[in-house]
């Protein structure tokens, strides 16, 4: 085979460079550990008691909805088995705040008119306690997790309340997971 004007030489050089890097990294004792479970605990079980809604507002089933989302997240993102009680890891808590706040005021330009907000913020706070019976230094008590969702005031809140509540809960569940078993 005849090489014309060095066309194939860069490709051969690139392949050799990649092979050299692979051989060097494997002979230097480089290793990578990765856990598909997303957790850094030796525990096998977790018990999660119902999170109660201790707010004056919100849907009546918020506590049950949040608890189910939390349990499902642990099932899907860890190798932990969710048990009814006495898990090696234990979690409980409550929904402590469900608040609608007017934000982003818009001036009418007339000092006699009431300035109205163009947006509203839904904020939800959950207080959680986590007990790691295998390593109590990883435990926490009454830690607050909060998140919010802003939406325009021309939107009917009752039409989107369930959707926005779920989005906020998903974020809080992720934060609780990271603070407990993922140790972030």
Image (cartoon, rainbow, N blue to C red):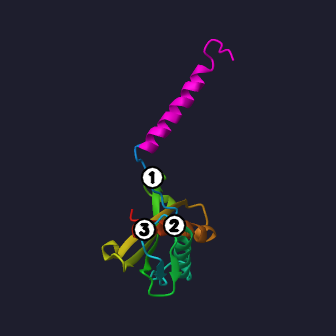
The residue lying furthest to the top in this view is 5
Q: Residue at x 44, y 38 (%)?
A: 24
Label 1 neighbour load within 10 Å: few <14, some 14-19, many 20+: few
Which residue bears the numbered disc 2?
168
Q: Residue at x 52, y 62 (%)?
A: 36
In the shown orientation, is residue 131 left or right of residue 67? left
Q: Residue at x 46, y 66 (%)?
A: 39
Comes first in the chain, label 3 or label 1 = 1
Q: Which mark is residue 32?
A: 1
**Residue 20 visible in the snapshot:** yes
Above/below status of 183 relative to 20: below
Comes first in the chain, label 2 or label 1 = 1
Quadrant containing the C terminus is: bottom left
Q: Residue at x 57, y 69 (%)?
A: 76
Task: State the extent of the magenta-drawn residues as a range.
Answer: 1-27
The residue lying furthest to the right in this view is 1
Which residue bears the numbered disc 3?
146
CA gap between label 2 and label 1 equals 34 Å
Magenta portion: prevailing SS class: helix
């Amino acid at each position: 085979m005849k090489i014309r004007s060095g066309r194939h030489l860069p490709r051969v050089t690139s392949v050799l460079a990649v092979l050299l890097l692979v051989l060097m990294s494997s002979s230097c004792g480089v290793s990578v550990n990765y856990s598909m479970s997303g957790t850094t605990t030796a525990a096998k079980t977790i018990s999660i008691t119902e999170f109660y809604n201790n707010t004056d507002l919100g849907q009546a089933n918020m506590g049950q909805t949040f608890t189910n989302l939390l349990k499902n997240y642990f099932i899907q993102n860890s190798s932990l088995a969710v048990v009814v009680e006495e898990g090696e890891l234990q979690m409980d808590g409550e929904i402590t705040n469900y608040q609608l706040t007017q934000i982003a005021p818009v001036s009418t330009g007339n000092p006699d008119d009431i300035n109205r907000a163009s947006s509203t913020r839904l904020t939800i706070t959950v207080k959680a306690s986590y007990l790691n019976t295998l390593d109590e230094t990883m435990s926490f008590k009454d830690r607050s997790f909060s998140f919010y969702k802003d939406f325009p005031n021309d939107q009917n809140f009752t039409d989107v309340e369930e959707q926005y509540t779920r989005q906020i809960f998903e974020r809080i569940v992720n934060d609780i997971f990271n603070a407990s078993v993922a140790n972030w």
